[in-house]
Image (cartoon, helix red, strand yellow):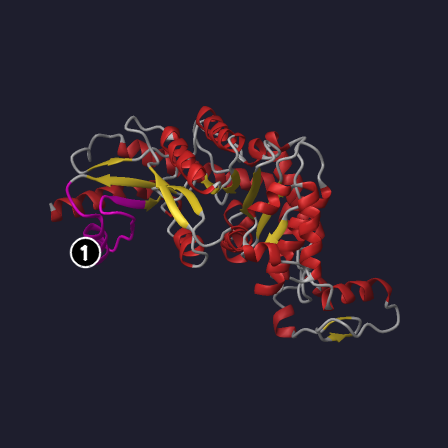
């Protein structure tokens, strides 16, 4: 083991031994090297005559660039576009995102957590979590309505065993009892579990009520009190898109500093929150189980996360970080976000209005939804994959088949006035096949 990794592990052992236990074998071996990047950082501060460290080309006192590119980006200083960004992300962006989290999540106020580290969007954050905390055979607790990429990231790539529980009760609420039973069974079997909470949920478009959210947190605390280590991940990809009665903030704040055996990790990003999917800018934030400022633990986890970023991709794109900083600092940012939110909310409520019309009750039911981008139909008479293909080939309509009965509809990309026609066409497709 590298001495730097051993040093970080010793710090964890002293200040949060359960956090050390939760690390994977790879996680225990991770460290951030004191190599080129560290030496370059020192040179940036002190090399006043010549700086011959970092591997970029310079010209006229700044980074070298092509005019055919810069001519399209004249609103930005070349120094904020072309050089490498720091491995953990631009400090200004990390600070602005932390402020944003505190503003939008009241339960995080007064809690102790790390500075957000910039990731190459949220999927990269999931990969970091898998590398740092998942060993082959570890249990990952997920609802049966889940984003399929979790299977690839945690199962195929890291060897986790996915333990699913029913997402909804027969009456339409979030099935907290099923979650609790699955969690307890894995806790008793393994002594360590990874819990992934994705709200608003993809594919269902559901966010729990405040009571349901509190019950999920209580269930996690209960198994921790029973001696199980819990890595609790909040996948907040669609954060802020809450249209009806539900939680209006991430469960990260309620889980942070809750119990020494609970390590909480928040994954979020500008990707969907600020409608900049192609920018690939996300964040990973850690909170341990101690109810006091535990800087050595946060430092160790940040250094290990920076180590895996350095090993896998070196650092995240610089231009998109600059663009997001400009957005967060804009006086029009909140107003423009609210305008887009209202468009999205209108589409969600129109979808529910159309589905509640009674026109389609022989063809399908629909799962509860109150947030995010999606909703799911539960088909009664036809196979969802056959319907998907038929809709595509006959009507030019695309949807996603997730199970034999479930068809995911992204109302996020359908204009409100077109939603009635969309479901009429889907209904025709069902009648064609029935």
Question: Is 388 inside the magenta-drawn segment?
Answer: yes
Q: Which of 394 and 408 is in front in this view?
A: 408
**Image quadrant in which you'd find residue 286:** top right
349 and 170: which is toward the camera: 170
Q: In this view, does 252 lie to the left or right of 393?
A: right
Using residue 106 as the reference point, say whether residue 421 is left or right of it: left
Q: In this view, does 39 lie above or below 136?
A: below
416, above or below 43, in the image: above
Which residue sits at x=27%, y=34%? 355
Q: How many labels does the image show?
A: 1
Mark 1, secondary structure of its residue? helix
Q: Choose between 400 and 8: the one closer to the eye.
A: 8
Q: Residues within 10 Å of mark 1 (few under 14, many from 20)?
A: few
Quadrant containing the C terminus in the rendered view? top left
Image location of residue 356, percent across then percent down: 27, 30
Which span is picked out in magenta? 381-408
From the viewer's perspective, tell me whether residue 395 is left or right of residue 431.
right
Q: Name the residue under label 1.
A: 394
| Location of residue 33 in the rendering, given as x and y in whole percent from the top left corner | 70, 63
Residue at position x 65%, y 41% in the image:
16
- Say if the magenta span includes residue 338: no
User: What residue is drawn where x is 19% and y is 53%?
Assistant: 386
Where 433 falls versus 319 (above or below)?
above
x%, y% of residue 118?
Answer: 61, 53
> Image quadrant for the N terminus?
bottom right
Q: In which quarter of the image is residue 372?
A: top left
Residue depicted at x 31% and y 31%? 353
Relative height, residue 362 to residue 153 (above, below): above
Please state which of residues 246 and 126 is positioned toward the viewer in this rendering.
126
């Amino acid at each position: 083991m590298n001495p730097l990794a051993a040093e970080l592990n010793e710090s964890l052992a002293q200040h949060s031994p359960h956090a050390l236990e939760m690390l994977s074998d790879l996680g225990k071996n991770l460290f951030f090297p004191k190599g080129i990047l560290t030496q370059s950082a020192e040179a940036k501060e002190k090399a006043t005559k010549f700086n011959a460290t970092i591997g970029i080309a310079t010209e006229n006192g700044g980074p070298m660039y092509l005019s055919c590119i810069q001519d399209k980006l004249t609103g930005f200083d070349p120094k904020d576009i072309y050089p490498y960004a720091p491995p953990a992300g631009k400090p200004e962006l990390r600070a602005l995102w932390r402020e944003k989290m505190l503003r939008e999540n009241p339960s995080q106020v007064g809690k102790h957590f790390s500075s957000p580290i910039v990731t190459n969007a949220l999927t990269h954050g999931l990969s970091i979590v898998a590398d740092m905390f998942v060993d082959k055979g570890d249990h990952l607790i997920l609802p049966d309505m889940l984003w399929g990429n979790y299977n690839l990231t945690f199962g195929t790539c890291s060897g986790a065993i996915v333990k699913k529980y029913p997402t909804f009760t027969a009456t339409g609420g979030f099935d907290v009892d099923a979650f609790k039973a699955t969690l307890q069974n894995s806790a008793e079997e393994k002594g360590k579990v990874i819990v992934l909470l994705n709200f608003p949920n993809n594919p269902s478009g559901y966010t729990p009520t405040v009571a349901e959210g509190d019950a999920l947190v209580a269930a996690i605390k209960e198994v921790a009190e029973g001696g199980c280590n819990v890595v609790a991940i909040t996948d907040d990809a669609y954060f802020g898109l809450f249209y009806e009665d539900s939680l209006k903030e991430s469960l990260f704040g309620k889980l942070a500093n809750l119990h020494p055996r609970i390590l909480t990790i928040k994954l979020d990003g500008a990707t969907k929150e600020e409608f900049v999917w192609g920018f690939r800018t996300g964040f990973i934030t850690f909170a341990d189980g101690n109810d006091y400022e535990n800087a050595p633990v946060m430092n160790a986890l940040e250094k290990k996360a920076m180590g895996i970023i350095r090993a896998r991709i070196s650092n995240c794109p610089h231009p998109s970080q600059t663009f997001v900083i400009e957005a967060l600092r804009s006086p029009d940012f909140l107003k423009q976000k609210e305008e887009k939110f209202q468009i999205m909310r209108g589409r969600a409520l129109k979808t529910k209005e159309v589905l509640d019309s009674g026109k389609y009750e022989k063809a399908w039911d629909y799962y509860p939804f109150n947030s995010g981008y999606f909703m799911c139909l539960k088909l009664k008479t036809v196979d969802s994959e056959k319907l998907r293909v038929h809709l595509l080939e006959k009507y030019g309509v695309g949807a996603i088949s997730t199970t034999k009965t479930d068809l995911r509809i992204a109302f996020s990309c359908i204009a409100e006035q077109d939603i009635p026609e969309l479901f009429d066409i889907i209904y025709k497709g069902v009648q064609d096949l029935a």
